[in-house]
Image: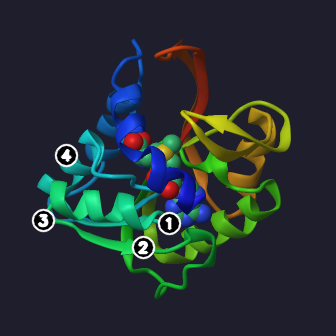
Amino acid sequence: MGDGYDAIGETFAEWREQGSGDPRRDWEDKLVSRLSDGARVLELGCGGGSPETTRLAQQFALTGVDISPRQVERARAAVPDAEFVCADFTELELPGSSFDAVASFYVFNHVPRELLAPLLANIHTWLVPGGWLLTAFGQSDNPGWTGDFLGAPTFFASYPPEINSRLVREAGFAIAEDEVVAWEGADTPECFQWVLAQT
Ligand SMILES: C[S@@+](CC[C@H](N)C(=O)[O-])C[C@H]1O[C@@H](n2cnc3c(N)ncnc32)[C@H](O)[C@@H]1O
């Protein structure tokens, strides 16, 4: 996964801006409105310094994690006020109750299905009581598939929405908002399940 985004990082950043109706800003607003200034926010799969990362870093103490060394390098240059860690977040060990929120934009559809439940359980431990999770899950029934994405081999996997929601609840979260949203991507229709949940 790191190699792929090392290669396509810049292409991805341009590609993601070309769609129309991407709801990521609206969902980021829902999270931001629930946090106090200076809150500790962890962004998983932050990429190379997206507008969402920039905005979160302006208001909060942001730590971004990405598996791609090149994307982390870009993020550090683009968002100097945040801290960035190059790591696989499915293997990350962090102290308990160390963040007020965890955010992730278009990343969990790259996580092998069997790792989603342990990842959600870890996120729950990293959050303070009352902490928030915002994420966009893939929503097709895809056991795992590697194919070309913007010129690099990329792994995708996802569960249908009812299973994603169940996994979130089973990890100990209360779901505040849960919606499947479709829009026109740059070259294909896009559809993700957005979930905002609280510990
Ligand atoms: C589709 S991009 C999204 C990037 C950014 N969140 C955005 O919306 O522009 C997915 C990102 O997740 C990262 N990623 C995927 N799996 C990861 C993992 N297990 N650990 C850390 N980063 C991961 C990739 O390197 C890539 O930068």
Tell me the element at label 2.
strand
Distance from the alpha carbon under mark 3 to that under mark 1: 20 Å
**Residue indicated by mark 1:** 67
Tell me the element at label 3.
loop
Tell me the element at label 1.
loop
Q: How many marks?
A: 4
Mark 3 vs mark 1, foreground winner is 1
Q: Quadrant of the N terminus?
A: bottom right
Q: Amino acid at mark 4?
A: Arg
Position of 92 relative to 133 (above/below): below
Q: Residue at x 54, y 33 (%)?
A: 150
Position of 113 relative to 99 (above/below): above
- Dot 3 or dot 2: first in sequence order is 3
Mark 1 vs mark 4, foreground winner is 1
Q: Is mark 2 within 8 Å of ligand 1?
A: no
User: x%, y% of residue 92?
Assistant: 55, 79
Q: Amino acid at mark 1?
A: Ile
**Residue indicated by mark 4:** 55
Distance from the alpha carbon under mark 1 to that under mark 4: 21 Å
Q: Residue at x 31, y 70 (%)?
A: 84
Distance from the alpha carbon under mark 2 to that under mark 1: 5 Å
